[in-house]
Amino acid sequence: MSRNRAAEAALLLVLGLVTGLAAAQQKRENNVDALRPNGPVTVTADRAEWEQNGAMVYTGNVQLSSDTLTLRGDRLELRQLEGGQFTASVTGKPAHLAHPGLKEKNGEAGPPVSAEARTLNYDSRTSMVDILGNAHLTRGKDQIDGDNIGYDAAARRIRAAGGEGGQVKIVIQPPPKSGTGGSRAAPKAPPPPAMDEGVQP
C-alpha cells in the first residue's frame, strides 16, 4: 500500500470515528431535550397572592404542570426569571413529582420517575429538582429513600444523601426470570447504573 493510500485509509477511519461519536452525542442530546420540561407552564391552586419580593404564592391543592413534569402540593412559591425561566418551591404533606419515561423508537416508554417529600425545589434553568425531607423516589420498580435526593429531569440522573447520621436506602429489583418448561435461568445481576440514569453518591 502506497503512502497516499495509507493516508487516505487513515483519514477515512478518523472521519468514521468522528461521525460515529457525533451521532452518539446527538442521540444523547435529543434524548435529553425530549425529557427536559418545555413549553407553557400551567399552575392551578385554590388561592394566589403576589408578594412584595416579586414571588407568586399559590396555596391549596397546588399543581404546576409542563409538557413532561408535574409538581403537586399544598403551597407553591414561584419566581419568574429572565428568558421565561423560573424557580418553583412546592411544599406538602407530602409534595409529589411525576416525570414520564422517554418513548423509544420501538414505541415502548422508559421507566417513569415519581417522588415525594416535604419540599420540592425546581429550577427550570438546570432542570434540577431538589427533593428534601423524608424523600422517596421511584424509577420504574426501583426505589430510593433518603433525606435529600437530587434529580436532574433532563439527564435523568439521580443523587441521594442520607442526611445527618442517616443512610440512603436503594432497592433495585432483579430482572424478570426467563425459562421454558419449568426450568429457570440463573438470575442475572442488575447492570451498573448508566451515566445518564445512574445513582450518584
Image (cartoon, rainbow, N blue to C red):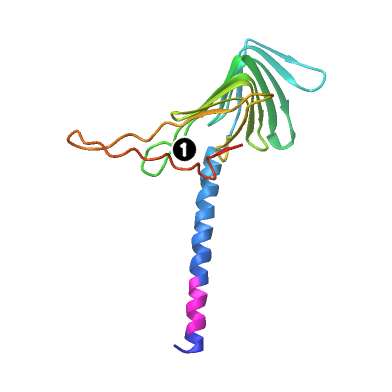
Magenta span of residues: 6-13
Instruction: Mark yes or no: residue 62 visible.
Output: no
Vertical relation: 48 (above or below) 147? above
Q: Main secondary structure of the magenta part?
A: helix
Give the residue at x 52% y 47%. 30
* 7 in magenta: yes
Label 1 element class: loop
Q: Amino acid at mark 1?
A: Leu
Q: Nearer the viewer, residue 148 or 28?
A: 148
* Residue 53: quadrant of the picture: top right
Answer with the quarter of the image where residue 104 lies. top left
- Residue 176 visible somewhere in the drawing: yes
Residue marked by disc 1: 102
Q: Is residue 106 above or below residue 6?
A: above
Pointer 1: residues within 10 angstroms few (<14), some, or many (20+)?
some
- Which image quarter holds the N terminus? bottom left
Q: Which residue shows up at 43% across the image and 28% down it?
A: 141
- Residue 165 drawn at (x, y percent): 67, 24
Relative horizontal placement of residue 17, taking residue 88 as reference (left or right): left
- Seen in the image, is 200 located left or right of residue 79? left
Where residue 47 appears, as percent x and y from the top left, is 67, 10
**Residue lying farthest left?**
181
